[in-house]
Amino acid sequence: MTCYCESDPADVFEVRLVGKARKRHKCIECKEGIEVGEAYTYVSALYSGMGWSNVKVCEYCWHDWNYLASNGHCIELGGLSEAWEDHWFTVKPLKKS
């Protein structure tokens, strides 16, 4: 599926699913804590002229991230809430029977 971004996409985008946290982390999307023992996803992205961005995403935000990406939304790291807003403006309402 292709997405269209206003900004330049990452030159390299790598996702590593991590089993469970060994120490407390902070989710880049919801800013909530990822506690010891909770699952999370480690994401690395390389942007031209900016270097690497390495972040952690909690399992709930990662689920949402995948849903939106599979529906054609381009999501910048840390931009999940903005992507949800864009999604709801593009969803067609259900017709009443």
Image (cartoon, helix red, strand yellow):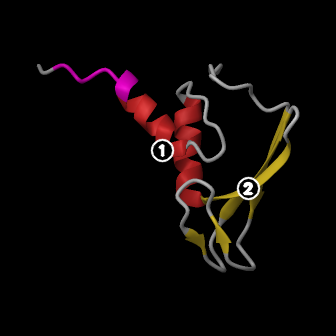
View extreme (front): residue: 49
x and y, in percent, of residue 39 in the image: 65, 67
Using residue 81 as the reference point, say whether residue 5 is left or right of it.
Answer: right
Count residues near mark 1 (Cα–Cα under 10 Å), then give few for <14, some for 14-19, many for 20+.
Answer: some
Residue 24 quadrant = bottom right
**Residue 76 located within the stretch drawn in magenta:** no
Residue 64 percent coordinates (x, y): 52, 46
Which residue occupies 84% across, 39% down? Answer: 50
Mark identifier at residue 11: none
Q: Residue 81 carries which label?
A: 1
> Is residue 16 in view from this perspective?
no
Amino acid carrying mark 1 in the image: Ser
Q: What element carries label 1?
A: helix
Residues in magenta?
89-95
The residue lying at 71 percent from left, 72 percent from top is: 20
Q: What amino acid is at disc 2?
A: Val
Does dot 2 land on a helix, a strand or a loop? strand
Q: In which quarter of the image is the C terminus?
A: top left
Q: In which quarter of the image is residue 42?
A: bottom right
Q: Note whether 88 is above or below 90 in the view shown.
A: below
Q: Above or below — where is 19 with respect to 23?
A: above
Q: Name the residue under label 2.
A: 55
Relative height, residue 62 to residue 92 (above, below):
below
